[in-house]
Image (spheres, grey):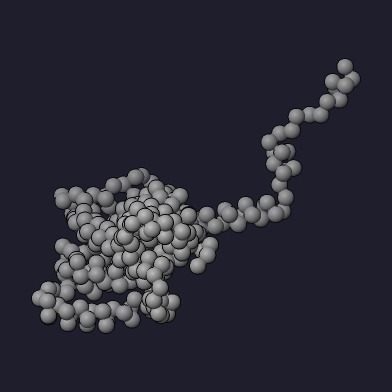
Amino acid sequence: MAAMTNAPAKKSFMDHLAASLNWQRFLFALALFIFLSMILFPFYWMVSSSFKAGSEIGGRHPVYVPSQLRLDAYQELFNPEAEHFQDFGTNIRNSVLVAFPAAVFTVIISVLGAYAVARLHFKGKEVMLNSVLIVYLFPAVLLIIPLFAMLSTLSQSLGFQVQDNLPVLILTYLAQTTPVAIYMLTSYFRTIPQEIEQAALIDGCTRFEVIWRITLPLSIPAIITVGLYTFMIAWNELLYALIFLNNRDLFTMPIKINAIFNDPSNRLNTVMAASTIMTLPVIILFVAFERFLESGLTAGGVKG
């Protein structure tokens, strides 16, 4: 009976927490909390502001939680009967028509270019690869003037219109995304053992059959990474679209959001609603392909 009465008391949750917590773990948890707050709070503020009234956004004191979930901003974007109807569905369609082809064409061009650099032997290929990457280091504002002049010269010869032309805008995005895509895929292709491809060549496969049957299946993570990277650039790009598009019916989402923001009337809730709609597809794609992105971004750095 005495042994039973001297049994240690059962520890509470706080006792276990105090026993397991030390300064290193506390500092790590604090740093993680601050880091996640810096990432998640702006997204929360954008989404919550899309449901606020204009007075709640423009007031002197910040309103962290809207008084009620108002759908006025979303109705303004999509409801034709709204007072300031924005026809945002057209802008979404234009962004899709630009971003998806830009991603697909970039992947096709970069796969062929990166395979040539990684597998074929020719003089100056390292210089060419580094030169391609150097082009990407230049700010977009420095490239837009010579690019516009070059396309204007071609338009006079071939008879197409430079401005208000979505295919031309896609072509300008390829000039931005292809260099770094080739560099990324080259590093990844070099991690694939050449013996597998050489065995296929001995069995009678052509180079294109080797790329299609062997290289591409083994490079799915890198290809998805490049495709999402390119899609994200074309989806969010503003400067080139602002220069090459003047017709409101062809505006992509970034231009439309900029136009709503610069409107004299205070409709920041509409800006936040449009920004939320623009952000969600990128988040969904990143979450859906997260396992491919992790291997695609790290495998190219194993050896090069």
Q: In the rendering, at what x and y percent does residue 57 appear? A: 37, 57
Q: What residue appears at the point 39 percent right and 70 percent down from the top-left corner? A: 120
Name, please, the residue furthest toward the left: 159
264 vs 220: above or below: below
Name, please, the residue furthest toward the right: 2
Q: In the rendering, at what x and y percent does residue 68 appear? A: 36, 44
Q: In the rendering, at what x and y percent does residue 168 appear? A: 20, 70
- Image quarter hosting the N terminus: top right
Residue 219 seen: no
Residue 51 seen: yes
Q: What residue appears at the point 71 percent right and 47 percent down from the top-left corner? A: 21
Q: Is residue 66 left or right of residue 8?
A: left
Please name whichever residue, 78 or 170, is drawn nearer the observer in this view of the structure.
170
20 vs 211: above or below: above
Q: Is residue 55 left or right of residue 301?
A: left
Q: Is residue 165 left or right of residue 113?
A: left
49 vs 69: above or below: below
